[in-house]
Image (cartoon, rainbow, N blue to C red):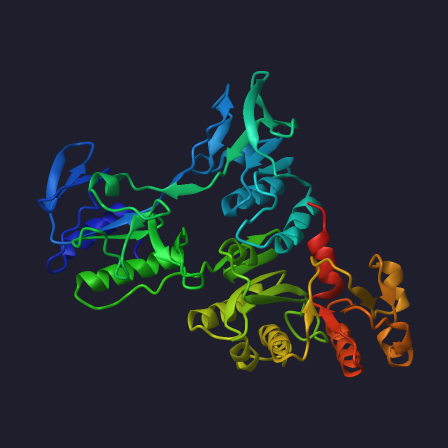
Amino acid sequence: MPSWTLEEAMRLTAEIGFDGIELAAWRPHAWPRDLDATRRQEMNSLARQYHLAYSAICMVQVNHNIASPIETERRDSLVYIQECIDLAADLECPTVVVGGGFIGLEMVENLAHQGLDVTLIELADQILTPLDVEMARPVEDLLRRHNVTLALGEGVTRFEQDGERALRVHTKSGAIHPADLVILALGVRPDTALATTAGLSLGSRGGIKVDAQMRTSDPDIFAVGDAVEVRDVVTGTDTLLALAGPANRQGRIAADAVAGRPSQFRGVQGTAIIGLFGTTVAWTGASEKALRRLGRDDFEKIYLYPNQHARYYPGAKMISMKLIFAKPDGRILGAQAYGEEGVDRRIDVIAALIQKQGTVYDLEEAELCYAPQYGSAKDAANFAGMIAANVLRGDMPVAHWDETGESLLLDVREPSEIAAYAVPGALNIPLKQLRARLSEVPRDRPVNVICRSGQRAYIATRILLQNGFDARNLTGGVLAVQQGGSSS
């Protein structure tokens, strides 16, 4: 394969040519300036201005970095992500990263690998805000184990010069973080300047409004990419989603539409993934908090902690999973997972089912690859479906780690486990002794049953239900309690 520069490749493509297509992208430093009503695109370049006639045009729009509104006395120590390439390679100084999203976390990891002291400041009370808060906590603990200082729920109020090179970063709590380098990863907003100039309609989220064929309010102008508003197939709302996969598919849909094919973009569900310090976090569909913001309560959730492959096979690693599904039909609404291995595969399986409006019953019956080094005969994805189906069938009523009330908490772990971690206020009756000690369990209130991860609690819940108790399995067990209750 020859080694070509982008300009050489574009020149060659232009020379080969396509019927009815003219390429302007090879012209160095050329960019669109305006789209006028006479179907001409005005181009600016360093050399000249010129016009290109068009019958249809597709705008591939990206995002702008969100600029900092924060007062600062020095801007040479304050940089945005696009300015950070190779900047940290020779640093030996404390660094502050503002923003706990994808790019901010990737910067944090790379700076930490350089041996720098890193502080991450995030306005929200968690990192990775698409996740539910309890699923973000293990990732935050991971950062702390790698000596990253977290300042969550903190807004930066100003940057102050400290000596010849350094800055002092002030936050709303009154804390001061010294730094020789501050990286702003504040997020992005859609770049709609050209669309606005062309008189195109914008949507409720500030992005370019398009139909299912990526056509804008001008029928001869199409738009794809980060700056367009698209439909969330799970919630039915309009959203902005800056992900490469959907943008690529939008480009194909727009090309089909221009060529006369009736292709349509189905929408998005926000499937995403990030690697961090040897672990993986991934999610798809709606989060619990997103559903609650929309006023929905017609769903249930479960937590589970399966291994990524057979437990007896060397190298088994636990995956922390959360599955959200609709009541009563069991349609899968979302999933989140965190672990060292196997996270991507399980989220991809669930994402495919969400796309087809699949249910937890479909998930429990999904036929997936199995060999001990790759999974279990009851794969982690199947297991999630089976637990959720048990809930909907009434076989396993559930309670949750964040619920309060008058319920009795019954811990069915062994005494040695209790010695290592005791759940406050719980009555301990080991599962093996439960049938013989049922008289010790009160019948005047609901009983929430807990074990390490939920399996023994399921058996105990079935015993109690069959003996007339109002019993529920606390889904995810002690692991969910620890995960949800970990400090921020």
> In this view, which residue lies farthest toward the front?
444
Q: Nearer the viewer, residue 105 or 64?
A: 64
Q: Does residue 485 appear to the left or right of 54 in the view shown?
A: right
The C terminus appears in which quarter of the rendering?
top right
At which x and y percent is residue 216? 23, 52
Q: Does residue 158 appear to the left or right of 460 in the view shown?
A: left
The N terminus appears in which quarter of the rendering?
bottom left
At which x and y percent is residue 374? 60, 74
> In this view, which residue lies farthest toward the top?
163
Q: Is residue 309 visible?
A: yes
Q: Is residue 368 visible?
A: no
Q: Nearer the viewer, residue 29 or 450?
A: 450
Q: Is residue 168 above or below residue 274?
A: above
Q: Does residue 44 appear to the left or right of 479 in the view shown?
A: left
The number of callouts visible is 0
- Find residue 282 and report its image quarter: bottom right
Q: Is residue 163 above or below residue 65?
A: above
- Find residue 465 and report its image quarter: bottom right
Which residue is painted at 55% across and 27% down in the image?
157
At which x and y percent is residue 98? 54, 36
Q: Does residue 90 appear to the left or right of 462 in the view shown?
A: left
Q: Is residue 177 above or below residue 274?
A: above
- Find residue 34 and report its image quarter: top left
At which x and y percent is residue 152? 62, 40
Which residue is painted at 58% across and 75% down in the image?
385
